[in-house]
């Protein structure tokens, strides 16, 4: 029997020792050429910000000199910037100083984000915080409020930082850390992934060979700079190849998705990617009049990743935007994660994506078989790494066509989690193999990602994937926001809030439901846009979602909780944090607009309120996004 694994390609020869060396070579050779352009969106007619390679080098040397003076060499430095060129200068300044950059979201007044960034600051032990002049006073006050007043802050958009002429190249080795990429925490607390210079160079080379990038190439995007695709794919890869990176803020995209597509035409962008929801948002929000003015003929590589890639999104996007010059093969579904720096597998950008229609019942039993019921989009073949499918809870490799946990080995697999030996040993300790926690299947050398191991819902001996349930429900009514639902299982007959046991047999046949009086119940927490609810009838919306789930999966869907936009937690990559949503549901901390619950599930919540509804006149202000 052939085991499901992929042999890596031969790495390129003559790779520079560190990413710092790459940046210095580019700034020397391309001094007066634009490295970055940022498109502001303040409604005041602001002009784009330009940063040349020489300007980047000069600003980075000044920041590096300041970091050296303040004892930050070899130490983590937190980067808290709004979108713009100041972040890029700060990141390169950390490289030039031999410091360890820690990109993170700029704290706002949202409690969840403030707590996350405070956790990153304490976990990393950052010795300094870099930001912009507009935010440094606020950050200094915030640091004092969280009992960290001695952490120094620097505004990296000043012109008088340090002394660029006094800069000396750091003594950086390939094994040194380039930066910490804090995981988005879809199923656990965020952890700092240690990305070395070797990891970063290996993955950038793999991306270049996969996407066919070249010097002078224009890359564009709107993803946050602390998002792994936004950072490594859109910012650092442009530096790696000596190209131009054109950026806008995530808010600019969410407010007016057409701006992303206009940017591609205006700057002749060749490479730009996003999670699936972004393509879907363009489908729903770009008008015929706006479409008529678009030119997408330069776009030749559109990575689609970070969340389940939907075949219907790929088809609909190509059909909708082909009149603007979009080619059918532009989409390149891919798979990656922070623990592998970024890219693991990617579909060939020169060919149309692989779309498979498979037997849904067989897939629920862990077998990929031709049939009807579910459509999968392939995520391509491995890029300079090995991929293996393993039976969960074991180290036994599975044959092609069987679903199991995705394991990865290669030079892009990172050094583990910063200061967390237990988590590192758990995920990185299998003879060089990384246990990803993701489920997938290999077929003819191509990876098909099916879900998250810890999120699989086991009902009556069937393994159901939450994103399939969410998709079915969201198709039931136009008021239900795509990509903004969380399906999970809770168990009656045990203490409220108790976690379900590990799904060690998530991809094998399960012969019976839970023993005794315990029973699994399906719950859907789903955002609803009140302004789009017909006649304000939330009960009808919930009923439609229940019916859609019942029709497609033949399982009872007696628990639907409708919530306002912005309630469903997401990772920095846009993934739904289902485990977090399950905990919030069981803790009774969600505020429903309308809910219908089975009595056994309501009992789990203790003194939960009765079914609740609000008027459809209530404000609806939050758009789906990629916030943490």
Image: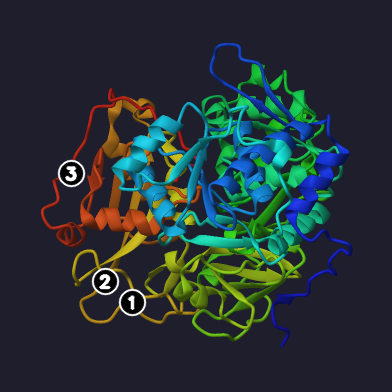
Tell me the CA gap for discs 3 and 1.
Answer: 29 Å
Q: Estimate the spatial distance between the alpha carbons at disc 3 and disc 2, rounded to whole Å.
A: 22 Å
Question: Disc 3 on helix, strand or loop?
Answer: loop
Mark 3 or mark 2: name the one nearer the start of the chain: 2
> In what element is the residue under mark 1?
loop
- Is the Cβ of the residue at disc 3 closer than 8 Å to that at disc 2? no
Q: Position of residue 362 (x, y in %)?
A: 55, 71
Residue 519 badge: 2
Q: Nearer the viewer, residue 227 or 528?
A: 227
Q: Callout 1: 10 Å neighbours few (<14), some, many (20+)?
A: some
Lateral position of residue 30 relative to residue 247, left or right: right
The residue that disc 1 covers is 513
Residue ID at (53%, 54%): 76
Contact? badges 2 and 1 (CB < 8 Å): yes
Badge 2 local density, few (<14 within 10 Å), some, or many (20+)? Answer: some
Q: Is residue 364 visible?
A: yes
> What residue does disc 3 label?
611
Quarter of the image where one finds residue 164: top right
Viewer-side residue, 62 vs 244: 62
């Amino acid at each position: 029997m052939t085991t499901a694994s992929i042999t890596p390609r031969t790495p390129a020869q003559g790779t520079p020792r560190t990413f710092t060396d790459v940046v210095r070579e580019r700034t020397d050779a391309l001094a007066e050429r634009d490295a970055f352009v940022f498109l502001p969106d303040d409604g005041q007619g602001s002009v784009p910000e330009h940063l040349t390679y020489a300007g980047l080098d000069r600003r980075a040397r000044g920041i590096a000199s300041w970091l050296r003076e303040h004892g930050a060499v070899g130490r983590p430095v937190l980067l808290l910037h709004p979108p713009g060129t100041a972040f890029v200068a700060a990141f390169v300044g950390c490289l030039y100083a031999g410091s360890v950059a820690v990109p993170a979201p700029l704290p706002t007044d949202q409690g969840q984000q403030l707590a996350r960034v405070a956790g990153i600051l304490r976990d990393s032990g950052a010795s300094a915080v870099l930001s912009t002049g507009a935010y440094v006073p606020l950050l200094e006050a915030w640091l004092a409020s969280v009992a960290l007043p001695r952490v120094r802050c620097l505004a990296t958009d000043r012109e008088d930082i340090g002394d660029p002429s006094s800069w000396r190249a750091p003594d950086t080795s390939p094994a040194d850390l380039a930066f910490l990429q804090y995981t988005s925490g879809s199923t656990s607390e965020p952890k700092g992934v240690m990305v070395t210079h070797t990891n970063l160079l290996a993955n950038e080379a793999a991306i270049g060979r996969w996407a066919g990038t070249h010097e002078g190439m224009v890359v564009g995007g709107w993803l946050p700079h602390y998002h792994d695709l936004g950072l490594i794919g859109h910012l650092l890869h442009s530096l790696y190849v000596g190209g131009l990176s054109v950026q806008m803020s995530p808010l600019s995209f969410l407010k007016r998705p057409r701006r992303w597509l206009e940017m591609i035409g205006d700057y002749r962008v060749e490479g730009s990617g996003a999670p699936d929801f972004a393509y879907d948002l363009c489908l729903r929000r770009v008008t015929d009049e706006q479409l008529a003015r678009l030119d997408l003929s330069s776009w030749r590589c559109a990575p689609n990743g970070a969340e389940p890639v939907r075949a219907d999104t790929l088809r609909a996007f190509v059909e909708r935007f082909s009149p603007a010059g979009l080619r059918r093969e532009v989409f390149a579904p891919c798979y990656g994660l922070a623990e592998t720096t970024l890219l693991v597998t990617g579909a060939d950008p020169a060919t149309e994506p692989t779309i498979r229609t498979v037997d849904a019942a067989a897939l629920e039993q862990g077998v990929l078989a031709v049939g009807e019921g579910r459509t999968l989009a392939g995520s391509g073949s491995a890029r300079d790494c090995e991929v293996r499918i393993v039976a969960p809870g074991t180290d036994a490799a599975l044959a092609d066509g069987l679903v199991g946990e995705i394991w990865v080995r290669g030079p892009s697999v990172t050094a583990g989690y910063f200061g967390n030996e237990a988590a590192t040993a758990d995920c990185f300790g299998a003879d060089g193999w990384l246990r990803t926690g993701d489920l997938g299947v290999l077929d003819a050398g191509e990876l098909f990602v099916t879900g998250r191991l810890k999120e699989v819902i086991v009902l009556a001996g069937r393994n159901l994937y939450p994103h399939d349930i969410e998709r079915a429900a969201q198709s039931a009514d136009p008021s239900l926001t795509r990509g903004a639902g969380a399906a999970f299982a809770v168990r009656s007959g045990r203490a409220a809030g108790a976690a379900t046991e590990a799904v060690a047999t998530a991809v094998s046949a399960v012969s019976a439901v839970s023993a005794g009086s315990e029973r699994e119940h399906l719950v859907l927490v789903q955002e609803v846009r009140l302004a789009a609810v017909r006649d304000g009838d939330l009960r009808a919306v919930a009923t439609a979602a229940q019916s859609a789930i019942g029709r497609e999966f033949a399982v009872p869907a007696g628990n639907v909780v409708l919530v306002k936009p912005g309630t469903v937690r997401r990772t920095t990559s846009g993934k739904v944090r289902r485990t977090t949503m399950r905990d919030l549901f069981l803790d009774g901390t969600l505020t429903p607009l309308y809910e219908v619950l089975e009595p056994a599930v309501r009992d789990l919540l203790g003194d939960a309120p009765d079914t609740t509804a609000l008027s459809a006149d209530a404000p609806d202000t939050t758009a789906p996004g990629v916030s943490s």
